[in-house]
Amino acid sequence: MKKAFEEISKLNWIVAMLLFFLVLSWVIYQQWFMNLNHSLIPVSLAFDPSCDLRAGPCETILADGSSVSFAIQPRSIPISDQLTLEVIISGMTVDNVSVDINGTDMKMPPNFVNLKHTGNGHYSAKSALTFCTRSTMEWESVVHLDTGNKLIKIPYRFITSKQTY
């Protein structure tokens, strides 16, 4: 009986050690994965109040002379309908383009959308705004540009109202 107890104890110890190393490996992997974007130098630009996404694409000229254009289709920007997000980049090379859409004063979980490169500096993706109970809501779409050594964040704001959906 004592020998059987020792065997079970050894088995429990082995299982516990395997679980410990599995959890430790997962934590190390997560930290490594999360630090990939942390090695980028963040560059956040100010919101341009003259931008009106309902009138058409908004263009931002960066300090190095490169430009970023952002548009949402349809221009009425309806709630809970499919939207097309479009980014056009000129004068710089990027590794990844994504957009985070969120409320300016009613924060929701991050809503990152990775845009697909469609050629000639054009990127696009489908997305939708989450339903909001407010009659008027101000939103911010932050375009994230991963340039390899910098993470450039460009905010664009727009307002939705029950009259637009």
Image (cartoon, grey):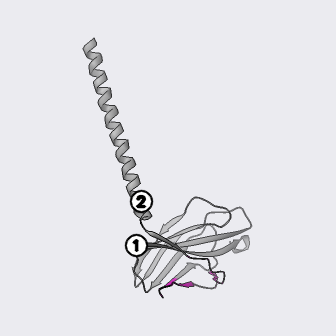
**Residue span colored magenta:** 45-68
Q: In the shown orientation, is residue 27 left or right of residue 113? A: left
Q: Position of residue 69 (x, y in %)?
A: 52, 83
Name, please, the residue furthest toward the left.
3
Look at the image and tell me in which quarter the C terminus lies: bottom right
Q: Which mark is residue 35?
A: 2
Q: Does residue 119 sit above or below 104 in this rendering?
A: below
Name, please, the residue furthest toward the top.
1
Residue located at (45% from left, 70% from top): 41
Residue matched to label 1? 149
Q: Position of residue 5 (x, y in %)?
A: 30, 17
Viewer-closest of 22 and 139: 22
Q: Residues within 10 Å of mark 2 (few under 14, many from 20)?
A: few
Q: Residues within 10 Å of mark 1 (few under 14, many from 20)?
A: few
Residue located at (74% from left, 67% from top): 135
Who comes first in sequence, dot 2 or dot 1?
Answer: 2
**Badge 2 amino acid:** Asn
CA separation in Å, label 2 and label 1: 13 Å
Q: Position of residue 105 (x, y in %)?
A: 68, 64
Q: Residue 120's quadrant in the figure?
A: bottom left
Viewer-closest of 15 and 31: 31
Magenta stretch: helix, strand or loop mostly:
loop
